[in-house]
């Protein structure tokens, strides 16, 4: 898929654990893990907004388009 999820990078930069982010934005750790691994077909704008708010970042810091990617 040409969309690469860089959520783990943003979590690391902010020294935040996945569990903490999941609790903050109101989703399960399992769903956050699926999102981090890129194994989801989509993400709600509401969820993306909450992630960006919690991590103080932009959507482009989390999602990257790479047409040559095989991830």
Image (cartoon, rainbow, N blue to C red):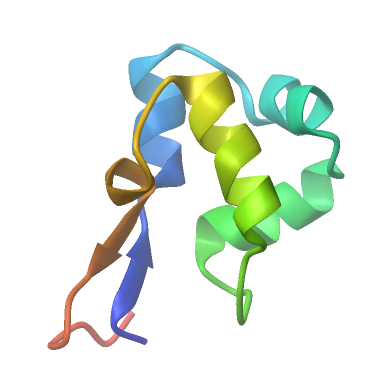
Position in image of residue 25 (x %, y %): 75, 32
The residue drawn where x is 61% and y is 59% is 35
Q: Quadrant of residue 19?
A: top right
For the N terminus, the image quarter is bottom left
- At a point 81% along the width and 52% down the height, the residue shown is 30
Count the numbered circles shown: 0
Horizontal arrangement in the rendering, residue 67 relative to residue 30 (left or right): left
Residue 12 drawn at (x, y percent): 40, 23
Q: Quadrant of residue 58?
A: top left
Q: Which residue reaches farthest left?
A: 68
The answer to whether 53 appears left or right of 12 in the picture is right
User: Where's residue 41, x and y in %?
Assistant: 61, 82
Q: Is residue 34 above or below residue 36?
A: below
Query: Hey, which quadrant is residue 20 in on the image?
Result: top right
The residue depicted at 48 percent of the width and 23 percent of the height is 55
Q: Is residue 60 left or right of residue 46?
A: left
Q: Is residue 2 above or below residue 14?
A: below
Query: Looking at the image, which is closer to me, 50 or 2?
Result: 50
Along the viewing direction, whichever of 30 and 63 lies nearer the viewer: 63
Q: Is residue 2 left or right of residue 57?
A: left
44 lies above or below 26? below
**Residue 21: percent from the left, percent from the top?**
68, 26
Name the quarter where the C terminus is drawn: bottom left
């Amino acid at each position: 898929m040409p969309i690469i999820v860089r959520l783990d990078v943003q979590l690391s930069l902010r020294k935040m654990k996945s569990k903490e982010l999941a609790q903050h934005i109101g989703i399960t750790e399992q769903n956050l893990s699926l999102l981090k691994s890129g194994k989801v077909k989509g993400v709600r704008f509401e969820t993306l907004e909450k992630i960006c708010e919690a991590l103080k970042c932009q959507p482009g810091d989390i999602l990257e388009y790479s047409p040559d990617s095989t991830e």
